[in-house]
Amino acid sequence: MLAVGGHMLGSLDPVMVRLTTGLCGGIGCTYAEVCGALSGGVLVIGALHGRSTVHEGDQRAFQLASRYRQRFAAEFGTTLCGPLRDQVRSPGGLGSCSLVAERAALILLQVLDDA
């Protein structure tokens, strides 16, 4: 997702890169929470369409994040890291979470393009 963020934003501040570190592996490699690729995509949506003050509207970012989540869930059947990881490692599965991240990036780019 950092590659998509860098592409869409032109560059990434090192703080933005550090902010995403704990998302890996369903939050801190616990494999217990939402997929880090999904979380990272939502951060990119926020960076592009989120509000910068409390007085701005946030509906556009909410709509895009919801659409991204729906398409992600439709593609993988879940948004949780553990079940995704099981799918990846099962016989005939993707074999690597990097392929989940790649597909998630394509979904994110489609959602942003449709916007």
Image (cartoon, rainbow, N blue to C red):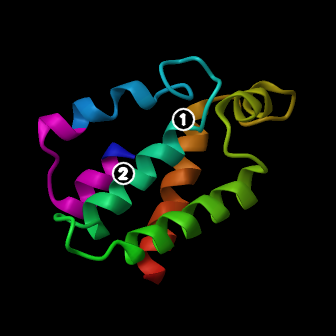
**Highlighted range, magenta:** 3-16
Q: Is residue 43 left or right of residue 8?
A: right
Of residues 100 and 38, the one nearer the viewer is 38
Q: Percent position (x, y) of residue 22?
A: 39, 25
Left or right of residue 28, residue 94 in this image: right
Amino acid residing under circle 1 = Ser
Residue, far right = 91
Residue 82: percent from the left, percent from the top? 71, 27
Classify residue 52 as left or right of residue 40: left
**Percent from the top left, x then y, of residue 19?**
27, 34
Determine which residue is flagged by label 1.
Answer: 98
Amino acid of disc 2? Leu
Find numbered disc 1 in the image and state the secondary structure of the residue it sits on: helix
Q: Which residue is mark 2?
A: 43
Give how far apart the Cα atoms at labels 1 and 2 are. Answer: 18 Å
The residue lying at 60 percent from left, 32 percent from top is 97
Outermost residue on the front side: it is: 55
Residue 13 counted in the magenta span: yes
At horizontal 16% and vertical 65% (from top left) the residue drawn is 53
Is residue 75 part of the magenta span, yes or no?
no
Q: Is residue 37 above or below residue 69?
A: above
Badge 1 local density, few (<14 within 10 Å), some, or many (20+)?
Answer: few
When the figure is inspected, residue 78 is found, relative to residue 90, above or below; the finding is below
Q: Residue at x 34, y 71 (%)?
A: 58
Q: Nearer the viewer, mark 1 or mark 2?
A: 2
